[in-house]
Image: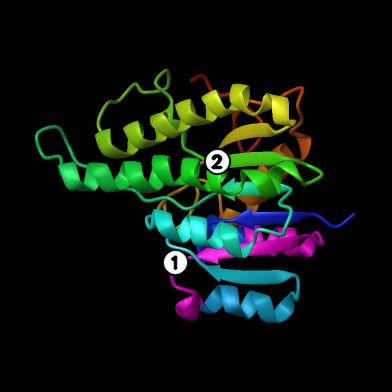
Amino acid sequence: MNYTVLITGTNRGLGLEFVEQYSQLGWKVLACCRDKDNANKLLNLQEKFSSIEIFQLDVSNLDEINTLSNTLNDRSIDVLINNAGIYRSGPLGNIDPQAWIESFKINTIAPYILIEAFLGQIIKSNLKKIVSITSKMGSIDDNTSGGSYIYRTSKTALNSMMRSLTHDLASNGISTLTLHPGWVKTDMGGPNAWINSYESVVGMIEQIEKLSQENSGQYLDYAGKKIKW
């Protein structure tokens, strides 16, 4: 059976790796990125895999999300992966309120708007799965060092939003998963991280494959380890 996945933030890092691995698995991939014309690595992947469609989408532009949903109105989307995100932070006493607002808009509000906008396409699919890429830094239980106020709170809010959706969407047969990719060697994770994008995405795809109505609503890392909220 042919499945379709929609992924945001696909011009680099984890998003690009998701596109490549799902394409290798034979999926139809709807790859969304902020600057389609300059997404050279993504465009090169499209030359290798005819199953990839690339769409311009800046998730901070909430109107663009609804416009894309209208464009894809006749599609069914088996898996929606909210991958796009930003890292903004600052120490106590030196927080930029505008950076905080921007982080909530991209890391928290945009994923919700995407889910709401594409709900019809997800409901009519076979798998009906919604996944948001978060961070262990969003775990209140795991916060033993303080700091990173902007990033932590935007991801904690994302986690809470996903937890609510688990309950609200269960009657539609939709399963949700909140995933921590691990500390990954990307532009965001930096060169000292523990694993590369390939390892992280292999693990995350495995967790997405295991996702069902029975285990919906979990907060896991890429290896399947449960994280306390």
Residue 62 is situated, as x and y percent measured from the top left of the image, at 41, 53
Marks 1 and 2, how far apart in space?
A: 18 Å
Instruction: Determine the residue positioned at 49% across, 75% down.
Output: 36
Residue 54: x and y in percent read: 60, 71
The residue wearing badge 1 is 34
Q: Is residue 36 magenta?
A: yes
Report the residue at 26% width, 33% height from top: 149
Determine the residue positioned at 68% across, 43% down.
203
141 within the magenta span: no
Q: Which residues are magenta?
A: 18-39
In the displayed structure, 225 sits above or below 75; it is: above
Vertical side of 156 occupied by 141: above or below: above
- Crowd band around label 2 with a 10 angstrom C-alpha radius: few (<14), some (14–19), many (20+): many
Q: Residue at x 75, y 76 (%)?
A: 50
- The answer to which of 20 and 73 lies nearer the viewer is 73
Q: Pointers 1 and 2 in contact (CB under 8 A)?
A: no
Q: Position of residue 156 (x, y in %)?
A: 40, 29
